[in-house]
Every structure is written in structure tokens, then in C-alpha cells.
Image (cartoon, coloured by chain):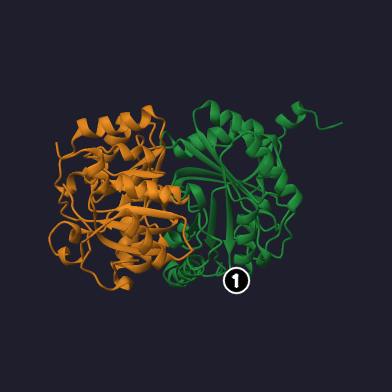
Chain colours: A orange, B green
Amino acid sequence: MNKSPDRTEGRRIPVIEIFGPTVQGEGSVIGHKTMFVRTAGCDYSCVWCDSAFTWDGSGNADIRPMTPHEIGEELRRIGGETFGHVTISGGNPALLPQLAGLIGLLRERGIRVALETQGSRWQDWFWSIDDLTISPKPPSSRMETDWTALDDIVAKLTEKQRLFSLKIVIFDDVDLHYAAGVHERYPQIPFYVQAGNDQLKEAEPERLLPYLLERYRWLIDRVMEHNGLKQVHVLPQLHTWVWGNKKGV
Amino acid sequence: MNKSPDRTEGRRIPVIEIFGPTVQGEGSVIGHKTMFVRTAGCDYSCVWCDSAFTWDGSGNADIRPMTPHEIGEELRRIGGETFGHVTISGGNPALLPQLAGLIGLLRERGIRVALETQGSRWQDWFWSIDDLTISPKPPSSRMETDWTALDDIVAKLTEKQRLFSLKIVIFDDVDLHYAAGVHERYPQIPFYVQAGNDQLKEAEPERLLPYLLERYRWLIDRVMEHNGLKQVHVLPQLHTWVWGNKKGV
């Protein structure tokens, strides 16, 4: 066995971006002042992924294998004394058992940790995340949801009474139907839907914003008339309204 | 004594608007699908109040004294079976002890209740609100905070372990300094700052939005560099981005 806990803890984390402080743009932590640590690698390849550089090879030159200590130092160097919240995103950070070390280090320093993953893989460190978002991918992504894996994750978190939220990105009515099904399956879990952005090549925030507004209004209209979506938050991807498709903000 | 509990319960509620379902535009419930019940009357007169018609006399013709049952019926008539969340706003709804009856009726129907107030008055029904936002007003409002009243409200909610949040609308650096003081005074309470809108006469959403974006970016920049504001959410007033200054959305 090569995967003893000790070897796992010592393994380096493939980091592709560290930036902040900035505001969280999505879901239950929308608006929260946070630093971002983005990990490389994903088991999915969503057709509209806004961070495809984490898994399609185009960002390989930026990947750095880092220890938790090195990540902690870099966060401090960039963020100084301004922050108390770190978001770990990907790619799918749930592919990395060795994140346990980083999460432990941050929490020892009194820093809250947020993490987003699609709900395809479990890690025991899910129980240690302060703001955990599980974001299953709807049909427009061309991915298949592994309901057994998702049921298992929801059950494990629920049995330890961990608060977390579900978030679905919506591009069309088929996605909305999928979202309503997820909400019906897990009615007690705080539920967020987010208007998707499929204009990833648009470099001008001023041209992007009217489109995003229209998509958000469309999603609001569809959810408002929907009897099956009552305890639901409808949100934009706030950072794209403010900064467009720019990376690292 | 004219104010026996029974007389209070039976007293009608001065309602000035009922509308929805729509999305909450502010604070910890941002994006939540909700119905709105807006009450008339306020002990404050903030210079930038976006609902001055609730207290400056201009909306008097719209005020209807309603029973909880009548409000419940009207919510059902307008919202049908689409909603499970009602937001009570004002004015200052905390002036109205008789809201207890409405809050009880809604919760009996399985509806979550949100309420926003400035924290100048206590009501025992604060303990029954699912999503309570206390929003003290900063210096730009020209109002004076009653710190004794606010301390008392925070203590009463905290002692019964009720979750609630603090939200401060920010127009300038003096307001931001005030907000940092509130956060320092109550560091354990989830804390939100919101970019203020002082263009209340602008009727065109397309002209308003660039201004609101600029104000939001300004607030983000100021909070990001601030060492005293770590566990903080920085949010826009989302509904003004989507619908401008239009009422009833």
C-alpha cells in the first residue's frame, strides 16, 4: 500500500493560482472577502467550464507542487493581515486527499475555509470545511451525475450535522428541470441556482454585462413561477458582473 | 393599561406594499425567492432612504390596516403556490408589536420569515424570525445610533442563540469607519456591508447600473485593504442592478 495516511499528508498539492483578497462571486458565500487557492486537475470536463485551464493542459506551465506551509506563506505574502477566509477551488479539489494538511493549517490559524466541488468524490476532510458547496453539474455540461456518490456525500455530511449548500449552474430549461430534481432529492439542504455564463471569450466586461443581466433575469422569471422551487436562492456569478472574464480577481 | 397582549394581537398592521415572488436584493438572504410585505411608519428619516414613501407622507393613500389573515390571503392570491419565504420590511417593522400575529400565522403554514430593522427597538417576536437582519444606519444617514438599544438587541438574540446578521449601507469613508466599529463591537455576528445608492431619482436602469458598479468596486477596494474587516461580506443591492429604482420588484 502506497497510500498510508502519512504519505498522503506529505504529498504536495498541485496549485495553479493563488490570489486575493477579493470577493467570492458565487453561492452561499457570495460577497465574502476571501483569498483563493485554485488546484489543478479535474475528473470532469464540462463543456462550459470557466476554469478549463485547470484540466485541459493549457495551464500546465503554471502548476506548482506546493506544501501546505508554502501555500500558507504565499497567502500571507499576497494577502498580508487583511484576510480571515480562504476558498479552495479547482478543478476538483476533492481529488486531493493531501488537502487535509492545508485545511488543518489554515484552521489552526483561525482562518475559515470554503471549498467547492461537484460531488463526484468524497474526502474525510469535507467534515472540516466551514463553507462547503457541492455543485452537481446539469445536463448542459455533458457530464453524468453519479447519484450514488452524491447520495453518499450528502448522507455523510448530514449525519455529522455539517452545514453545507448545493449549487447548480443553469443554462437552459433542461438544466432547471435537473436542478428541481436535485432540490426535491435533498429538500433540507440550502439550495442555490446560478445563471451560467457561456460567453467565456468575451473580453470586454461592458459587452458581457448586458448579456449576463438578461440571463439572470431569465433565470429569475423561470424560478419565480416554479412551484417546486420555493426555498431557493437565485444568484448571478457576481465577479463576472464586476470584472468580466478576467482571471485572478 | 391599553396595551394588553390581546389588544396588541388584535391591532391591525399598517401595510403599504405586498408584492412578489421576487428575489431578495440584500444581505444574508441575497437572491432568496421571497414575497415582500412592507409596513408603513419609521422612527428614522435617513436622508438617502430608498423607501421614504413609508414615512414621509407621500404614500399615505396606499396604507391599508390589515389583519394577519388578510395579509395571508393577499400573499396567497398574488403568489399562489410558488413561495415559502416572506420578507417583512418597512419603514421600521419593529415599531409594530402586533406583527407577532402575522409571523405566527406564516410560520404555522411552514413559511420562513425574514425581517429587516435598524436596531433601534426590540420586539419579543425577533426571536421567531428565521432570517433577521439588523441594519444600523451610518453617519451619512444623519441618524444617531442608540448603542444601548443595539447592545440590548444583540444580547437578547445572542443569549437565545438566535442566528441573525448585521448589515451596514456604506456611502463614504466615514460610513466605512462606522461599519468597522460595529463589526469590532459584535465580532461574532455575521457581517455585511452594502454599497449605497444615492441616485434614487434615476429612472433608467441602464444609466444607473454603471454608477452602482463603480460604487460597488469602490467599496470592494476599501474593504479588501482593511485589516479590521476580515469576516465580512461585501454586496451590492442586487435588485437595483437588475431593475433600477423601480418599485414593487
Q: Please identify the quarter of the rendering in which residue A203 is found.
A: bottom left
Q: Please identify the quarter of the rendering in which residue A19 is found.
A: bottom left
Q: Residue at x 68, y 41 (%)?
A: B155
Residue A169 appears at what percent x and percent y?
A: 28, 49
Q: Is there any visible trace of residue A237 in the rendered image?
A: no
Does B130 appear above or below A207?
above
Q: How many marks?
A: 1
Of residues B205 and B212, which is closer to you in this image? B212
Q: Residue at x 66, y 58 (%)?
A: B137
Q: Residue at x 54, y 60 (%)?
A: B229
Q: Secondary structure at mark 1?
A: helix
Quarter of the image where the N terminus of chain A is located: top left
Residue A31 appears at what percent x and percent y?
A: 44, 57
Find disc 1 in the rendering and name its residue: B173
Of residues A149 and B6, which is closer to you in this image? A149
Does B241 appear above or below A148?
below
Residue B56 appears at what percent x and percent y?
A: 70, 58
Quarter of the image where the C terminus of chain A is located: bottom left
Of residues A248 and B1, which is closer to you in this image? A248
Q: Chain of mark 1?
A: B
Q: Amino acid under label 1?
A: Asp
Does A178 appear above or below A207?
above
Does B67 appear above or below A238?
above
Q: Residue at x 47, y 55 (%)?
A: A84
Residue B43 appears at what percent x and percent y?
A: 74, 52
For residue B185, side relative to residue B193 (left or right):
right
**Dot 1 crowding, Cα within 10 Å, few <14, some 14–19, many 20+:** few
Q: Is there any visible trace of residue B141 in the rendered image?
A: yes
